[in-house]
Every structure is written in structure tokens, then in C-alpha cells.
Image (tube, rainbow, N blue to C red):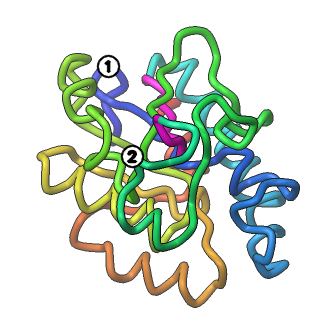
Amino acid sequence: PLDAPRAALLVVDVQNYCSHREGKGHRDAPEYYWDQLELTVVPNIKRLQTACREAKVEVLFTVIESLTQDGRDRSLDYKISGFNVPRGSWGAQVLEQVKPEGDEIVLSKTSCSVFVSTNIAYVLRNMEIKQVAIVGGLTDQCVESAVRDACDMGFLVTLVSDGCVTMSRERHENSLRALKGFCRQRTAAELIAELSK
């Protein structure tokens, strides 16, 4: 189970750019993506945030956000994919429904993995965090990268299976299967129950 004083909830890329219907990131996403995001994932993240905050679990966020306006600092992958979320833009803001409270940390990243293009491992270790629960999108891209890298860097990882989304159920389930050796998997309700003990 999560040990609240040594745990963090990491919300990956739930931001206007790719999680708001008016954002530029996933305009052509299938309706499956939007239904899962709006009806399941965002409500589950919101419930998890409430439970984590009550249990004194750190809540952190990562957003795709270039350090520059033109994105010249982005990873090659983001350049090829056409992802550029200019610094300080509306697209870089965390989705309103799950926005940070107080001094919760938001890390801007310029690559798929938050562990590659930010100092998150340093920050987590400074806060004596040993366990990281991960939610957000896309399950088979940025979330999967975060899970693998967090595990390889010595963090105990919990992937919230109904707190993540990608473009199809098949892609989501394939990613969950592929990640079994890197993390334990729990639903939002299971994790909230753990925190209430």
C-alpha cells in the first residue's frame, strides 16, 4: 500500500493542449479518447487528488511546455511529432478540473518522459518520496515512459489503470500488459481505499 508520507501522485500531461477539446494536441482524436478522458479519467484523477491531499500525499503535475516560444529546445520526438506548447501559453496550463492547489509542483517537460527532461527524480528524492502513483495521458506514451523510468530510477510505481487514457481501448490494454513488470496496477477506487486505511 501507499505510505502517505513517502508517496506522490503524478498527473501526467492533463493540460489544455491535449486534454481540452479546444486544445491543438488531440483535435483529431477519436471519440473514445474524449469519452474516456471526460467521463472516467478526469473524474478519477479529481477523486484521487482529493484523497491524496487529505492523506498528505504530495500531488505533482507535468505538462508539455517548451522553454521557448518557438520550441527550439524540444526533444527530437516532439519536433518530429509537431508538438510545441509555447512557454506560458493556455495550452500549457493544467486542465481546470484538476488544477494544482497551493504550492503543488508543476514541471514543464520537453520530451516524452518527465524523468528525461526535468529534475523530477531530484525533486522527489529531496521530498523523501519513495512511491509514485501515476495518472494521465497518453497511457502508451508519456505515462508508460514515466512508469518505466521511475521504476528504473528506484521508485515504487503504482499505475492507476482507470486514471489513464490513450486513443483506443486496445492501445490502453496493451500498454497495461506491457507495464506489469514495472509497476503494480490499481484502479482509482482501490488506491483511494488504500489511502483511507
Does residue 61 show up magenta in the picture? yes
Q: Is residue 128 left or right of residue 35?
A: left
**Does 110 sit above or below residue 95?**
below
Residue highlighted by disc 1: 5
Is 75 situated left or right of 65 in this image?
left
Q: Front-most of 4 and 36?
A: 36
Q: Residue at x 61, y 41 (%)?
A: 86
Residue ID at (34%, 41%): 132
Residue in view at x 26 percent, y 32 percent: 119
Q: Who's the residue at 26% across and 49% down the image?
A: 116
Report the span colored magenta.
58-67
Image x and y of residue 129, in percent: 25, 27
Q: Report if residue 63 lies within the magenta region.
A: yes
Residue at the limit of the structure toward the top, as seen here = 102
Looking at the rendered structure, the kind of residue marked 2 is Asp
- Residue 51, position in %: x, y? 59, 29
> Quadrant location of residue 177?
bottom left
Label 1 amino acid? Answer: Pro
Say above or below: 92 vs 77. Answer: above
Q: Which mark is residue 73?
A: 2
Using a 10 Å C-alpha cutoff, classify the residue at mark 2 as few (fewer than 14 neighbours), some (14 to 19) or many (20 or more).
Answer: some
Q: Main secondary structure of the magenta part?
A: strand
Q: Secondary structure at mark 1?
A: helix
Left or right placement of residue 171 versus residue 16 in this view: left
